[in-house]
Amino acid sequence: MKSTKSTKSQTQSAQSPSPSRSQALRKISQWVARVCLAAFLGMSVGSHFVDGLYWWAWIPLGLWLVIGFGVNRRAAAADERPVTGATTGAVAVAAPVTGRWKALNSPADKVPSHGTRVYGQAYAIDISAEPEDASRPGFGWWPLARRNEDFPAFGADLLAVADATVVHTEDGQRDHLSRTSWLALAYFFLIEAVVRPVGGARRVIGNHVILDLGEGTYALYAHVRRGSLTVRPGDRVRAGQLLGQCGNSGNSTEPHVHFQLMDTADPDTADGVPFTWRDIGVPRNGETFVAAAAPAAAETSGR
C-alpha cells in the first residue's frame, strides 16, 4: 500500500505541467503578445486612414496587456525576496567587470529588480562605470543625446563570471546614442520601450552573450558593444576571460552592463536565478563597489 506522502506527491506531479510544456506555453504567449502589440500599432496608424479602426485597435492592446501580465506573474508564487549574501539558492560567481562601478535596478532592493520577470530578469542587475574622478555626463535638458564615447562604461571589458560554455552570441546591432535628457527619456519610454518588444527579446536585450555555467544555470550579458565579442557558440571559456565590451545596444538609455542568471538559455522562457558576486555580494541601488581583476585567463577561446 502506497503512503499518503507518495500519493500526494504523484498527484501534485500529475497536476503540474512538465517543464517542456510550460516553456512551450511561455514561448507561444510571447509570440502572441508580440502579434497583438504589432496589430495595435498597425491599427493605430491605419485609423488615420480608415474610419472606426481606432476603437478596434483597443482589442489587441488589451490582449497584449493581459498576456503580458500573465507572463510577468508566472513566478509570483515563488519565494522571491531581495537578495543578500545569505540568500538560499544564490549562485556564487565572479563579477563580470573590473574597476569601480555603481549598481542600479538591483535585486538587493527588490525582486523583480526591473519590475518584470519577462526575459528571465527577476534577479537582473544594471551597473554603470563610476571612475574616481566622476568623469561621466550628467542628466538634464541639453544636449538631447550624447555619444557613447562620453560614458566611461562604453568599451569596458566584459569577463566570464565562471568556467563555462558559450551557447549564444549576437553583436550586430548598432550602439545608439544615449537617452540622458528629459526629452530623450520620454522618447525612450513612450516609443522605444513599446516598439522594441515587437522584435522579440533580442531587440530588448540588444547585443548579448549567453554562457552555460552548468547545473542548469545560464549567465546573460546584455547591451554588448557592436562587433566586440571575442567568443562564439561552442567556445569554452575560463573565469575572468574576455568576452567582449560594454555597449549601448537594445533597450538601453546609456552604456551600462546588464547581467543576470537564468534557468534556461532562452530568455523568452527563462526564470531568473539569484546570484552573488564573490568578494562583493549583491550591491544595492546606488552603491558603489570595486571589482578586483580575476586571475589571468587563457587568451584563446578554445575553438
Image (tube, rainbow, N blue to C red):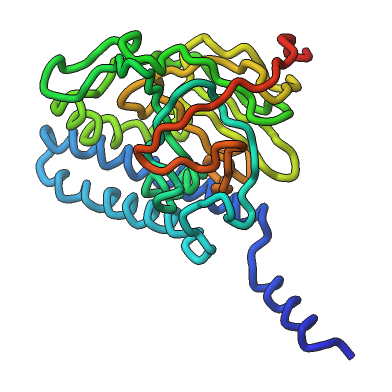
Left or right: where 246 falls relative to 292:
left
Name the quadrant containing residue 180: top left
- Camera-nearest residue between 136 and 23: 136
Residue name at image x 19 percent, y 25 percent: 139
Q: How many marks?
A: 0
Q: Position of residue 104 (x, y in %)?
A: 37, 37
For residue 3, above or below residue 139: below
- The residue sitting at the bottom extreme is 1
Quadrant holding the C terminus: top right
Name the quadrant containing residue 100: top left
- The residue sitting at the right extreme is 1
Q: Position of residue 90 (x, y in %)?
A: 61, 49
- Camera-nearest residue between 87 and 54: 87
Residue name at image x 20 percent, y 50 percent: 56
Left or right: where 69 falls relative to 10:
left
For residue 220, above or below residue 116: above
- The residue sitting at the front extreme is 132
For residue 16, above or below residue 280: below
- Camera-nearest residue between 303 and 162: 162
Q: Position of residue 15 (x, y in %)?
A: 65, 73
Residue name at image x 40 percent, y 21 percent: 249
Left or right: where 143 falls relative to 205:
left
Quadrant holding the N terminus: bottom right
Q: Position of residue 35 (x, y in %)?
A: 38, 41
Residue name at image x 51 percent, y 48 percent: 28
